[in-house]
Image: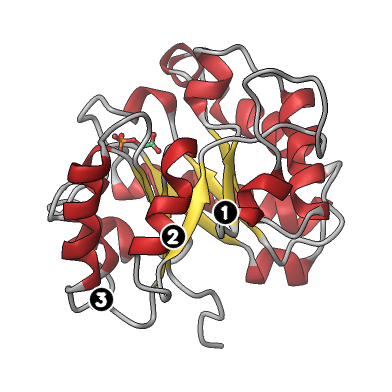
């Protein structure tokens, strides 16, 4: 059976850029020959979501990098899925390792955010991944299953969820998981979904890899059967992002 999963490449701009720099980046993306088989989404800093949406070609999606778990209220500094949609974006990245480990977000909070974002019809790029000491202790599976379980407990419909496996030791470090390491974890995650959610969801869920993906290593990673795309940080700000989008060509 042909792989039913559309290749998905997200750019996570994190807290980088300004109107000039992001505008230049957007112009180069708009003018590039992008593989039409790849779904592309750019994760803009909250304050530039509307700017990115207005500038980017409509075939490229826009994502927020975080949101809160309720629609509105006295939560100084937070943004809601309703606001993200109001500014024209359709996706949100949740549970990114920097949210988990720099800002102390728990599995419970992340799962509540996922539930609320989905209920507001945002697509969710839900991130999981083990730290270096956890990999070295041999508990990678345990960690990513636990994180996935917390998310899965609050997801009723998986159609608008993309699961991003991002080993923390590979994020922003220049140390990429080998294609075999990525495939191994993606495969066990798909198997977990098959056993704990359903076979249909396991077959259709995009599981993407993140962590020092570059133009140079993307093709081999993309050739792995359970790697359905990427979440790209540093390289999403560079011209090589186009090569990553076209990794399956
Ligand atoms: P990186 O970041 O590509 O710079 O390692 C990936 C991410 O944080 O999503």
Residue linked to disc 1: 87
Residue at disc 2, secondary structure: helix
Q: Residues within 10 Å of mark 2 (few under 14, many from 20)?
A: many
Q: Earlier in the sequence, mark 1 or mark 3?
A: 3
Tell me how far mark 2 sits from mark 1, CA to CA: 8 Å
Tell me how far mark 1 sits from mark 3, CA to CA: 25 Å
Q: Quadrant of residue 33?
A: bottom left
Colour scheme in use: secondary structure
Q: Which mark is residue 34?
A: 3
* Picture coordinates of residue 96, whole percent (x, y): 53, 32
* Picture coordinates of residue 168, whole percent (x, y): 42, 25
Badges 3 and 2: C-beta atoms under 8 Å apart? Answer: no
Q: Does residue 151 appear in the picture of this structure?
A: yes
Q: Residue at x 24, y 37 (%)?
A: 234
Q: Is residue 189 left or right of residue 135?
A: right
Nearer to the camera, 124 or 62: 62
Q: Is residue 186 left or right of residue 142?
A: left
Nearer to the camera, 243 or 68: 68
Residue linked to disc 2: 53
Please identify the quadrant where the N terminus is shown: bottom right
């Amino acid at each position: 059976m042909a792989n039913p999963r559309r290749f998905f490449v997200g750019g996570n701009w994190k807290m980088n850029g300004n109107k000039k720099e992001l505008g230049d980046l957007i112009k180069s993306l708009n003018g590039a020959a992008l593989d039409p088989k790849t779904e592309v989404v750019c994760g803009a800093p909250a304050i530039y979501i509307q700017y990115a949406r207005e500038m980017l070609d409509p075939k490229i999606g826009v994502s927020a990098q975080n949101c809160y778990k309720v629609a509105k209220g006295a939560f100084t500094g937070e943004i809601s899925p309703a606001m993200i949609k109001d500014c024209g974006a359709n996706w949100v990245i949740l549970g990114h390792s920097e949210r988990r480990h720099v800002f102390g977000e728990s599995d419970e909070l992340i799962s509540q955010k996922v539930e609320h974002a989905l209920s507001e019809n945002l697509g969710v790029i839900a991130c999981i991944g083990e730290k270096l000491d956890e990999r070295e202790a041999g508990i990678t599976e345990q960690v990513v299953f636990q994180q996935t379980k917390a998310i899965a407990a609050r997801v009723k419909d998986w159609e608008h969820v993309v699961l991003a496996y991002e080993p923390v030791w590979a994020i922003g470090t220049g140390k990429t998981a080998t294609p075999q390491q990525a495939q191994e974890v993606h495969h066990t995650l798909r198997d977990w979904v098959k056993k704990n959610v359903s076979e249909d969801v396991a077959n259709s869920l995009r599981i993407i890899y993140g962590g020092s993906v570059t133009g140079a290593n993307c093709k081999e990673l993309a050739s792995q059967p359970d790697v359905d795309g990427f979440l790209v940080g540093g390289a999403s700000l560079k011209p090589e992002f186009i090569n990553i989008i076209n990794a399956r060509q």
